[in-house]
Image: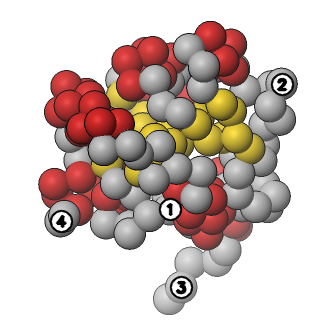
Amino acid sequence: MRSGDKVCSLSELTARVTAWRRAGKRIALANGCFDLLHVGHIRYLQAARACGDALVVGVNGDAAVQALKGPGRPIMPDVERAEILAALACVDAVVIFRERTVETLLRTLRPDVHAKGTDYTPDTVPERDIVRAYGGQVAIVGDPTDHSTSALLAQLRRRPAAG
């Protein structure tokens, strides 16, 4: 499947998830802004993929990223962030969601596993009650939070301009 085939609407994704479930696949969902892809993202997504047979990635839309991260964000538009994620071998499908939280996506897709990064604990995942209510599992995956887009951007701002 080409990366362009992996980016889909919620209705297309719902059909794919239904087909995967019929085939006996376990569905994992990871989500985030993914504004400037870094090694922490890769480790998070690879670990999330290990939680299931198919990995769906929810990408925050541009307005949500700006609301969550502040002025000057996102760096790249949501369609480009989605395309980059879709090019990763560990990712089976990507959907852009416009809400500030992933709750609607969780309620619609009902993934077996909702994978969150190590900046959370099972008890601090905001959507944990939604996931548990439909019988899903919350998994904390990836490496320690030593990497962040905000930290990378701050580092770039401190560097002298090349000339």
Locate the N terminus and report the quarter of the image it occupies. bottom left
Give the residue number, with chain letter if any, for mark 4.
2
Q: Earlier in the sequence, mark 1 or mark 4?
A: 4
- Where's residue 31, x and y in %? 51, 39
Query: Against 9, is 47 above or below?
Result: below
- Where's residue 64, x and y in %? 45, 26
Is residue 57 in sight in this rendering?
no
* Helix, strand or loop under label 1: loop
Answer left or right for 62 relative to 53.
Answer: left
- Where's residue 149, x and y in %? 61, 55
Between marks 1 and 4, how big is the CA–CA gap? 19 Å
Q: Earlier in the sequence, mark 3 or mark 2?
A: 2
Residue at left offset 45%, top offset 53%: 53
- Where's residue 85, x and y in %? 38, 58
Identity, as a three-letter code, of the amino acid under mark 3: Ala
Give the residue number, with chain letter if any, for mark 2.
123
Give the residue number, with chain letter if any, for mark 3.
162
* Helix, strand or loop under label 3: loop
